[in-house]
Structure formats: structure tokens, C-alpha cells
Amino acid sequence: MIVSDNGTELTSNAILGWQQGRLVEWHYIAPGKPMRNGFVESFNGRLRDECLNEHIFTSCRNTQHIIEDWRTDYNQNRPHTSLNGLTPNEFANRSNMDQNLNRPNL
């Protein structure tokens, strides 16, 4: 299921045709209520500010390469406050002792 706002880029005939052809369930949030989709709104803002506005895309292949590089950095190399300032790679590679120290005592 995809939840989105009612922006023109997400209500076009091309998107509607893609969604119907792949049997993807699509829900639109109420107009003027972006916080009903807060995680996506936050991600879209970061993607736009940190990637899309920073590059000139010359081809589909170039676009895919630039966005994939940004996605990899975002998902693996960037510190996350939810991980106490660790990158996802650092968090995943902690020793078992470190992981046990961060668990609540049962």
C-alpha cells in the first residue's frame, strides 16, 4: 500500500495507470493534512534538499546512479539520532556485549 498526498505528481494519469496495472493499493491523505503522512513528508524533504536540488540529471542512467549513491549514504553511512548517533553500519556491527549493554534489564 502507498499513502501519498494529492500532489499533481501523484495524481497524474501515468501514476494512476502504473498503480492500477500493478494492483497497488493507493490511499491519499486529506488535502492540507501533510502530518498524516509525516515520515514520508520528512523523507521527501530530505531527498529533495540533499539530492534532487543539488544535482543536474543528464540521463535516466545518471539519475539512477546519483540517487542510488544518496540512498546508500542515507541508509548505511549517515549517523541516526534513533541509533544514538551511530550509523546503521556501526549499529549493526556492534559486538554482542555492546548490544546487551543497551538492552533493558529483564
Image (tube, helix red, strand yellow):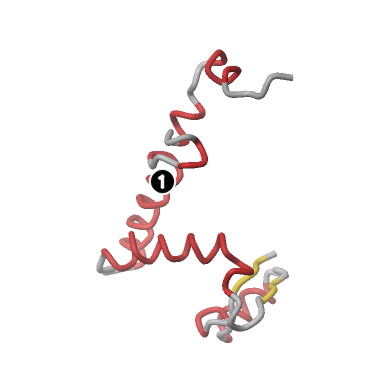
**Which residue is rendered at x = 57% and y = 18% of the image?**
101
Q: Which quadrant is the C terminus positioned in?
A: top right
Q: Position of residue 46 (x, y in %)?
A: 41, 60
Q: Left or right? Give the position of 100 relative to 27.
A: left
User: Where on the picture, by quarter, is residue 97?
Assistant: top right
Q: Nearer the viewer, residue 10 or 35?
A: 35
Q: Local crowd at mark 1 within 10 Å, few (<14), some, or many (≥20)?
A: few
Q: Position of residue 24 (x, y in %)?
A: 70, 68
Q: Left or right? Give the position of 2 relative to 64.
A: right
Q: Left or right? Give the position of 30 relative to 96.
A: right
Element under disc 1:
helix
**Which residue is rendered at x = 38% and y = 66% of the image?**
48
Q: Position of residue 12 (x, y in %)?
A: 55, 85
Q: Which quadrant is the N terminus positioned in?
A: bottom right
User: Where on the picture, by quarter, is residue 6?
Assistant: bottom right
**Which residue is rendered at x = 63% and y = 81% of the image?**
16
Picture layout, residue 63 above or below residue 17? above
Picture layout, residue 64 above or below residue 78? below
Q: Nearer the viewer, residue 1 or 86?
A: 86
| Label 1 sits on residue | 72
Q: Position of residue 91 (x, y in %)?
A: 49, 29
Q: Nearer the viewer, residue 85 or 89?
A: 85
